[in-house]
Image (cartoon, rainbow, N blue to C red):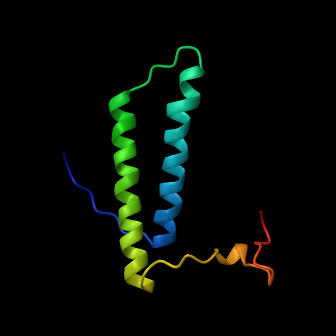
Amino acid sequence: MKTIKVEVTLEELLLATSLISDQLFRREFIDPKMPGYKGDPAELAMGKDLVLRLKTVIKQASETSAGPASRRAPSHLARNPNGIPDAV
């Protein structure tokens, strides 16, 4: 199998991983209910493995760039003084 190298930012990798996860969910749980759907279990398994690899890369990159990953809420979910996020 040929290996391809691509340079992306951490934010781009997060987005791509999220989109891939959503598509895998669709292929595993939604598409099989459609008439005439023919799934490929090997392709689904390969996709899941890819998502795990990408999440590992994201974790390593985020730890490298900012120390251990923070458990704080993302900036768009900044906490109020009472400790509850604005968006729930």
Q: Residue furthest top?
A: 36
Residue drawn at point x = 51 percent, y = 19 percent: 37
Quick one: quadrant of the C terminus? Answer: bottom right
- As displayed, is residue 67 above or below residue 48? below
Image spot of residue 59 (x, y percent): 41, 69
- Residue 58 is left or right of residue 2, and the answer is right
Q: Is residue 80 left or right of residue 46?
A: right
Identify the residue at horizontal 41%, vertical 52% (top origin). 51
Q: Is residue 67 above or below residue 4?
A: below
Q: Kindly indicate the quadrant of the structure image that contains residue 34.
A: top right
Residue 24 in picture, x, y percent from top left: 49, 40
Quadrant placement of the N terminus: top left
Q: Is residue 36 left or right of residue 39?
A: right
Q: Vertical placement of 17 versus 11: above or below? A: above
Q: Residue furthest left?
A: 1
Q: Residue at x 38, y 53 (%)?
A: 52
- Given residues 44 and 4, the one toward you in this image is 44
Point out residue 14 in the picture as x, y percentages from the top left corner. 50, 63
**Image location of residue 60, percent across then percent down:** 36, 72
Residue in view at x 22 percent, y 54 percent: 3
Q: Is residue 83 above or below residue 17?
A: below
Residue 79, picture quadrant: bottom right
